[in-house]
Amino acid sequence: MKTINFKIAFNKLCVPLLVFTLLLNMVSCAEEIKTNKPTNGDEEETGQFFKSAIDLTGKKIGYCTPSLNAPYYQALLQSIKSTTEKNGMEFISADGQDDINKQVAAVEDLITKGVDVLLLNPKDPDALVGVTKLAKASGIPVFIIDSSINPAAEFVTTIQSNNLANGELAGEWLVKKMGKTKMNIALLSGNAGNPVGKKRKQGLLQGITEEQLRTQGKIDLNVKTQAYTDWSYAGGLKAMEDILVAHPDINVVITESDVCVLGAIKAIAQAGKTDDILIVAGADGQKEAIKYIMDTDFYGCTAMNSPVQIGINSVKYAIEYLNGKRDFDKTSFTAPLLITKENAAKYYNPKAIF
């Protein structure tokens, strides 16, 4: 009878199994890293998975956008949808269609559908207060996304970029760039009374004046004109055309958002002034703006307002709430970040929605 060496046989069996197990763990870790890798808008990688002590299966996340008429809103919706579904929950969306009454009705519909959490990006800070109270009465927590709402509303926290800090970074950069050159400034805003626009504008002006005081010992803030663009390419184009006629000596354009000035670039180019005007944006990090920063000298900087990260954070906080957390700060910011020629390539993603 042939004698079997069980020790050798055991080793021959276990070593391959051990190698296989190690490889499997490496693949699993790689997948986890990929899942949680920060992104800048690649639609296939916008979602993240978060650990939950409770089973999230069947939970409904409702999101109401004020509109889908801009890439920013589309990227934000995609990020929320992707992260919601990656965590095993159901995503239900509603579009306010850029109309206050329609957004109110859309939120009411989400409440009727019995969502477990409501994510709301209000078109108007006052008009949506009532539906937040209706949601609370129905036992639905409300998270305000990207924009702001009247403090009288019933909500857990507001999730947005740090508009004040971002604006300050951009304003400081402008003064350092211009030095003692006299600035004749045109300010392009979104629309009158918008709370986010106000914060960005405040940040820009604070950044400029504080840096002037620090480095020059005085303030020379010469804002010659302001124009509203309705947060649109067409609005920026029209506003800049009018400004260049009325104020041909403008040499700096500061803006509350990339979208306000992307149309203005066409007017500046048509006037032959791309070598004479410097553009500084207090927000967004839109891919077209980053490309201009990389390729030209007239678009100086912008600050990051990532719809992808805001969407991810929104679902993260919703999951934390479902797991019992209640001690949220009233405002939850993403980290401030300035994008300049030195770091623009790091944040440019040609596949991004926004």
Image: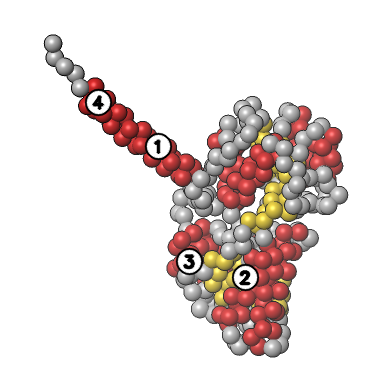
* Front: mark 2 or 4: 4
Asked whether, in this view, residue 5 is left or right of residue 189, the answer is left
* Front: mark 4 or 1: 4
Residue 252's place in the image compared with 311, above or below, is below
Mark 2 vs mark 4, CA separation in Å: 67 Å
- The amino acid pointed to by label 2 is Leu
- The amino acid pointed to by label 1 is Asn
Mark 4 vs mark 1, CA separation in Å: 26 Å
Query: Judging from the image, what secondary structure is the residue with disc 1 in?
Result: helix
Of the two numbered discs 2 and 4 on the same chain, state the one appearing first in sequence: 4
* Front: mark 1 or 3: 1
Of the two numbered discs 2 and 3 on the same chain, state the one appearing first in sequence: 2
- The amino acid pointed to by label 4 is Lys
* Residue 151 image point, x, y percent: 83, 52
Residue visible at 42% across and 42% down in the picture: 30
Query: Judging from the image, what secondary structure is the residue with disc 4 in?
Result: helix
Q: Residues within 10 Å of mark 4 (few under 14, many from 20)?
A: few
The residue beneath circle 4 is 7
Of the two numbered discs 4 and 1 on the same chain, state the one appearing first in sequence: 4
Q: Nearer the viewer, residue 50 or 218?
A: 50
* Residue 330 image point, x, y percent: 76, 52
Of the two numbered discs 2 and 1 on the same chain, state the one appearing first in sequence: 1
The residue beneath circle 1 is 25
* Residue 33 image point, x, y percent: 46, 45
